Structures are given as structure tokens and as C-alpha cells.
Image (cartoon, grey):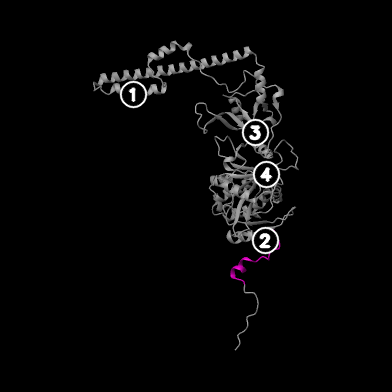
């Protein structure tokens, strides 16, 4: 799926956090703009764990700001947008939307049934072929036949286990296919409110640039150098800098931002450098020189230093 | 019979004292830090041709430079380049390295760090000097012509890499001592480099 969403993409501002709800937008931001964010939603099928998470994608304020500054995204006051959007909705539109959802669910269900049907037919055909082959062999060899039906039955059970959890006999499946039209539609929970509300929210629901910490220039500087930046809690730093997509690369730096003239405890440098070297990363400290001109956008006046243990 | 009264003078300094104190007593705390790091480099890590530099900055700071007995830092790409050509670290001539002596609890900031790095000589400038040396080396190693050629190629590429910053920009060793707890004498060393230099694969 290589679709590019319509720009600027909406970022929902909800209770002080920035979220992306559309899977197309989330993949687009990661692919084209090196913005990973953090998946913050539980999976509806496995709600009792938080190792694997799904939409929405939560963005750091720095990520949201960077996208807005690049003109890729806009910040939407989602609560007000939803409230007013829903209030101004016509009853016919609401009904039509619900009908759309139902027909979509029905279509999905039928598609799933048809696929199961095909799988079942294919596996049954295979079994038949095998049986025929075995029978042929048996006839030729005239051997003892006591174990053949058991093997066939075992194979049958394996196939049916993969094809469907319900008992699968050709009788049931044929009855099902005849009642395809009256099957219950699958319940669809839309992740985005797009068809119901406009994709580009009206200007009165747009918010100004996100407020960011003083580390933003360093963030922008590293991002402009092509690094993927993730939250650095795991290693006790501000950001983790990856040289490529975090799914493919180990991170290179533990990033800590400091003010230009802020008192810096050298022990921070030592502990960061030692920890970084211990996990095969460098410790990167940096900040923006406020006295220097920002000649070409945020982060151009940033100076950084990479620190590693010397091993002596 | 009277024994000669020992003269009320200081006892003779021990062999160790005479060995390690060729410098005069430092007058400032910064100078004391510098001389402690200098001694550590000289006597524990066996660095040679050590020099103390006093760059003109807005705050008092000294830099030490010297030649380590073996390589302290090799950029990962440089290492790959050397491995591909079968060169070992011992084959390559050693470089002068700068050391910044600091003490725990010292007032420090990013601004000062930048000032120190800006005072360092540009690595591209040194390239001419090392190229001249490499020519000598090439003659000396002459017995193994193949290796000499590879070394020459390496030096040439290194000069270019230094100008472009491909193998990292300016770098120094950050040395830190702790004067608290009576000063236990440990000196820790960290390689600090300008910019985003990818970590070594150690």
C-alpha cells in the first residue's frame, strides 16, 4: 500500500497529547518523514497485554511541531471538532453512514466466508486425490489396509483445524453457501471519522504550533540529518537516535539536550558515556547557540558532541 | 665521643618522588588538575612527547597533547577500510592526541565545550604533516613493497577523510579526576568528538 494521504494530514490534539488515528497517515509519516511515534492503542482481539499495540499513534510534541512546520500536518482540536461536527449532522446522513457501515460489514463477512469455502474445497480435493492415489497403490501392492483410513482421518482433522474452527463437513458448507445473503454482518469499528466528518477540518478547529521543550532545536537538527528519534526513557536519556527505521537498525546515540550556558555536571557526561558504551551506543550531548542566527530553519545553530568511553 | 648531630633539614625525597615530580608545584587548582592528568598519562599510560597548551579562552583551561603508545580511537569506517586492506593498527603511525583535563564538580557547560573544540587545530591542516611522515615510512618499510603501497594509499585517503570529516571531525580525550575523598588518583578518559559520529562496534 503506497498511498499518500491528502496534505496537510490532521493530528488530533486530545487531552494534551497528539494522536494519529489513520493507518495510512501513520505509515506515510514513518515512510516519508521519519516520524515513528508510539503506538498507544490496545488490540481489540488481545486486550490483556501491552507488548503489541495498535492505533492510535501517539506523537511527541516535537514530532507534531516538526510536521506542522514542514507543512505536512495540522493540529486539530479533536474534542470540539467531533462535538460540533456530530451536532450539525443531519439525520439522513447519520442513517446513510450506518447503512454504509452495515453493508461494508456484510461484504467483509461474505468475503471471509467465500475464502473459507475455497480453502475447504481445495483441501477436500487434495484429500480425494490422495485417497485415490493410495487406493491405486493399495490395489497394486495388495497390502494390509488396516492403517489407511486412520491416516486419512488424521489428515482430514488437520486440514479442518486450519480451515475453520467449526466442524467442517461438506454438508454444512453447502448449506452455508446457500444462506450467504442472510448472514450477520461483521461489526465494523471505524478508526477514523472521515466519511462522516470532513477530512480537512474547518479552520476554527485548527490549533497553533505545539508547545515544545527547549530540546526542540536539537531534535530538529538530528531529524534533518536523517535520524529517526524515539523517546529515550529506556536508556535514561531524552531521545534515542536511530540511523534508519528502528525496525531495521540499532540506535546510535543516547541523546541529551542542554542549554547553551546551562551548568553541566560532568558526571552526567561520564555516566551517559559509560552507559552508552555499555550498550554499544554513543552518548550525544548538544544544544542550540541562542546567540547565533538560525539561518535555515530550526536546528541549524545546534552544536553536538558524541562521547564514548576511551577504554583506558 | 660525640656523634655528629644530624642537620635539621628535610629528609631526602624518595626515589618515587624524584621520579614523578619534575614539574614545579602548581599554583592554581586548574594547573594542579592538569599536572595530575599529565602524570597519569606519562607514567600510567606511557604517553610520550607530552605538551601543555594554554589556549586563550574566556575561562582558564589547559590542554595536554601527546602521543599514546597505541591507538586510542579508530573510527568504525576507518577500521573497515584498514581491515579491507589488511592493515593493522600497529602498521599505522601514531597521531598526536589532545586531552582536556577536568575535575569532578567543575563548572562546565556546552558553551565552554564548544570554545575548547573551536580552539583545537583543524584536523585537515595536520594532514600535510602526516603525509610527509608517511613518505618516510614508505621508504623505511620498503621491504614489504605491497604493504607500503597500501599504507601510502591509506594515508592519502585519511588526509581526504580528515578534510571531509568522513572519519569523524575534531576529537579529544576528556579526562576527569575526582579530588574529593582525598583524591584517589583515578583518572577516567572519554573520547569526545564534534558532531554526530557513529559509535564504535566494540
Give me the C-alpha separation between circle 2 and circle 3: 47 Å
Give me the C-alpha separation between circle 4 and circle 3: 19 Å
Q: How crowded is mark 4: few (under 14 residues within 10 Å), some or many (20 or more)?
A: some
* Residue B150 is at least partly visible in this image: yes
Seen at 66% across and 53% down, the residue is B129
Residue B178 location, x and y as percent? 62, 57
Circle 4: element type: loop
- Above or below, comparing residue A119 to residue A252 in the picture: above
Q: How crowded is mark 1: few (under 14 residues within 10 Å), some or many (20 or more)?
A: few
Q: Earlier in the sequence, mark 1 or mark 4?
A: 1
Circle 2: element type: helix
Q: Which of marks 4 and 3 is nearer the N terminus?
A: 3
Question: Tags 4 and 3 in contact by the CB under 8 Å rule?
Answer: no
Residue B47 location, x and y as percent? 60, 59
Say which of A135 and B70 sits in front: A135
Question: Tags 2 and 3 in contact by the CB under 8 Å rule?
Answer: no
Question: Which residue position holds label 2?
Answer: B32
Residue stretch in magenta: B13-34
- Can you say which quadrant of the picture contains the C terminus of chain A? bottom right
Give me the C-alpha separation between circle 1 and circle 2: 84 Å
Question: Which residue position holds label 4?
Answer: A258
Question: Which residue position holds label 1?
Answer: A154
* Residue B152 is at least partly visible in this image: no
Amino acid at each position: 500500500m503506497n498511498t499518500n494521504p491528502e496534505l496537510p494530514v490532521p493530528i488530533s490534539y486530545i487531552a494534551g497529547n497528539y494522536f494519529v488515528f489513520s493507518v495510512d497517515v501513520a505509515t506515510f509519516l514513518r515512510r516519508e518523514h521519519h516520524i515513528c511515534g508510539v503506538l498507544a492503542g490496545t488490540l481489540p482481539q488481545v486486550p490483556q497485554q501491552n507488548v503489541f499495540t495498535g492505533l492510535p499513534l501517539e506523537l511527541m510534541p516535537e514530532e507534531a511541531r516538526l510536521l506542522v512546520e514542514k507543512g505536512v500536518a495540522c493540529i486539530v482540536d479533536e474534542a470540539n471538532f467531533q462535538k460540533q461536527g456530530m451536532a450539525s449532522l443531519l439525520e439522513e446522513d447519520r442513517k446513510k453512514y450506518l447503512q454504509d457501515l452495515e453493508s461494508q460489514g456484510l461484504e467483509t463477512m461474505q468475503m471471509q466466508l467465500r475464502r473459507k469455502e475455497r480453502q475447504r474445497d481445495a483441501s477436500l480435493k487434495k484429500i480425494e486425490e490422495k485417497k485415490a492415489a493410495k487406493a491405486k497403490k493399495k490395489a497394486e501392492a495388495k497390502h494390509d489396509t488396516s492403517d489407511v483410513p486412520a491416516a486419512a482421518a488424521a489428515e482430514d482433522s488437520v486440514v479442518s483445524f486450519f480451515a475453520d474452527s467449526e466442524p467442517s463437513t461438506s454438508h454444512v458448507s453447502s448449506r452455508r453457501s446457500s444462506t450467504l445473503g442472510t448472514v450477520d454482518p461483521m461489526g465494523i469499528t471505524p478508526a477514523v471519522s472521515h466519511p462522516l466528518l470532513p477530512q480537512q477540518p474547518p479552520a476554527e478547529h485548527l490549533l497553533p504550533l505545539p508547545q515544545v521543550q527547549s530540546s526542540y532545536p536539537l531534535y530538529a537538527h538530528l531529524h534533518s540529518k536523517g535520524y529517526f528519534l524515539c523517546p529515550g526513557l529506556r536508556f535514561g536519556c531524552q531521545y534515542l537516535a536511530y540511523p534508519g527505521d528502528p525496525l531495521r537498525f540499532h540506535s546510535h546515540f543516547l541523546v541529551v539536550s542542554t542549554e547553551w550556558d546551562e551548568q553541566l555536571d560532568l558526571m552526567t557526561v561520564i555516566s551517559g558515556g559509560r552507559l552508552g558504551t555499555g550498550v554499544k551506543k554513543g552518548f550525544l550531548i548538544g544544544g542550540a547557540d541562542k546567540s547565533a542566527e538560525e539561518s535555515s530553519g530550526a536546528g541549524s545553530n545546534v552544536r553536538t558532541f558524541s562521547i564514548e568511553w576511551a577504554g583506558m | 665521643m660525640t656523634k655528629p648531630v644530624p642537620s635539621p633539614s628535610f629528609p631526602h625525597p624518595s626515589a618515587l618522588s624524584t621520579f614523578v615530580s619534575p614539574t614545579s608545584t602548581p599554583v592554581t587548582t586548574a594547573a594542579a588538575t592538569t599536572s595530575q592528568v599529565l602524570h597519569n598519562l606519562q607514567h600510567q599510560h606511557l604517553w610520550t612527547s607530552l605538551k601543555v597548551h594554554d589556549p586563550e579562552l574566556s575561562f582558564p583551561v589547559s590542554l595536554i597533547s601527546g602521543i599514546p603508545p597505541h591507538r586510542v580511537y579508530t573510527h568504525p569506517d576507518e577500521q573497515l577500510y584498514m581491515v579491507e586492506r589488511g592493515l593493522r593498527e600497529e602498521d599505522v603511525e601514531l597521531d598526536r592526541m589532545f586531552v582536556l583535563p577536568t575535575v569532578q564538580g567543575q563548572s562546565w557547560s556546552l558553551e565552554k565545550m564548544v570554545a575548547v573544540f573551536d580552539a583545537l587545530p583543524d584536523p585537515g591542516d595536520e594532514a600535510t604533516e602526516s603525509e610527509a611522515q608517511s613518505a618516510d615510512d614508505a621508504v623505511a618499510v620498503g621491504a614489504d613493497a605491497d604493504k607500503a603501497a597500501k599504507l601510502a594509499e591509506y594515508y592519502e585517503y585519511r588526509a581526504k577523510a580528515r578534510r571531509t570529516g568522513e572519519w569523524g571531525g575534531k576529537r579529544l580525550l576528556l579526562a576527569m579526576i575526582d579530588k574529593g575523598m582525598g583524591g584517589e588518583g583515578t583518572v577516567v578518559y572519554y573520547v569526545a568528538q564534534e558532531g554526530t559520529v557513529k559509535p564504535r562496534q566494540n
